């Protein structure tokens, strides 16, 4: 039996006001309790798709279902966003509090936890992500990779059912990228992950969609390939992302 979808997109079309051609064209997608990768060229509409899924953009046509219910008001989407955590492509769009702890505790506070509970949830989440000791750091002074992990913590502290991760490996060095893979694989939540990193998606997701010319295509076939390569500075210890 197919698992019950958490989110369904039905016949979604979207175009931005000043552009004539649609970014998304009559698109359908079901996300159940699974890990899905989403890949596609720059500008193909991946981020737009995530924004529609959580109600930050409203489609021209079509609708979003959450747990089988049609989301047709901002109130519906506010409830959806309590259970669907969106990691923004740019961490700077996600982080707004002076300190890391305040940022990570913000979501739980919003969900109605007491300040003590929210602080405990935030500290625990930072610890799980290897960020213990970051609590009092000034958010806007963090490095790009640190910001990305703290942004992930702001979502995980709310214990959502579904994670929408928009290019989570951006700004991460190879060791941190590998740590992120371990973290994501250890999480119980369903995940939909946008990335340009094929190897990352192969290691973190069980199937893949491509988005191109406004349409989604499911990639069902495995192709074994191997390659050798040579490059400058190759004698320095290093890892490859694909
Ligand atoms: N607010 C906006 N107004 C007008 N056009 C926009 C707006 N936001 C995005 N677009 C355009 O819509 C298209 C899809 O953008 P989107 O950010 O969804 O692509 P993407 O697949 O996430 O790309 P990337 O891989 O570069 O992140 C692009 O051509 C982009 O320029
Ligand atoms: Mg994008």
Image (cartoon, helix red, strand yellow):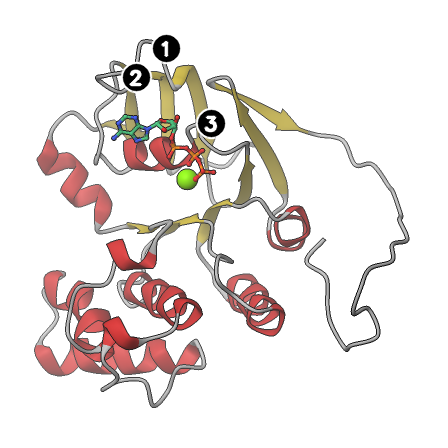
Q: Is mark 2 within 8 Å of ligand 1?
A: no
* Residue 159 vs residue 41, the one in the foreground: 41
Outermost residue toward the top in this view: 20
The residue located at (15%, 75%) in the rendering is: 98
The residue located at (47%, 60%) in the rendering is: 188
Q: Residues within 10 Å of mark 2 (few under 14, many from 20)?
A: some
- C-alpha span from label 2 to label 1: 6 Å
Secondary structure beneath disc 1? Answer: loop
The residue located at (33%, 50%) in the rendering is: 88
Question: Looking at the picture, how far across and down is residue 112, in whole percent?
Answer: 9, 65
One can see residue 59 in this view: yes
Secondary structure beneath disc 3? Answer: loop
Q: Which comes before the other along the chain, label 1 or label 3?
A: 1
One can see residue 66 in this view: no
Q: Residues within 10 Å of mark 1 (few under 14, many from 20)?
A: few
- The N terminus sits in image quarter: top right
Mark on residue 15? Answer: 2
- C-alpha span from label 2 to label 3: 12 Å
Q: Which residue is disc 3 drawn over?
A: 44
Mark on residue 21? Answer: 1
Q: Quadrant of residue 71?
A: top left
């Amino acid at each position: 039996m197919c698992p019950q979808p958490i989110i369904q997109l039905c016949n979604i079309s979207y175009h931005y006001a000043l552009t004539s051609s649609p970014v998304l064209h009559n698109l359908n997608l079901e996300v159940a309790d699974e890990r899905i990768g989403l890949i596609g060229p720059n500008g193909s509409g991946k981020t737009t798709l995530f924004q529609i899924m959580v109600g930050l953009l409203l489609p021209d046509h079509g609708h979003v279902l959450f747990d089988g219910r049609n989301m047709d008001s901002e109130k519906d989407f506010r409830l959806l966003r309590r259970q669907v955590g969106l990691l923004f492509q740019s961490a700077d769009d996600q982080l707004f509090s002076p300190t890391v702890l305040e940022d990570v505790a913000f979501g739980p506070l919003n969900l109605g936890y007491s300040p003590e509970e929210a602080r405990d949830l935030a500290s625990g989440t930072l610890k799980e992500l290897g960020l213990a000791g970051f609590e009092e750091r000034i958010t806007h002074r963090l490095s790009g990779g640190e910001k990305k992990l703290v942004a992930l913590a702001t979502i995980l502290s709310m214990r959502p059912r579904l994670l929408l991760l928009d290019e989570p490996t951006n700004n991460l060095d190879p060791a941190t990228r590998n740590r992120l893979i371990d973290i994501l694989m250890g999480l119980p939540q369903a995940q939909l992950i946008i990335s340009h990193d094929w190897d990352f998606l192969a290691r973190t997701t069980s199937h893949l969609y491509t988005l191109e010319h406004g349409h989604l295509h499911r990639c069902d076939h495995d192709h074994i390939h191997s390659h050798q390569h040579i490059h400058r500075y190759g004698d320095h210890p290093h890892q490859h992302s694909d």
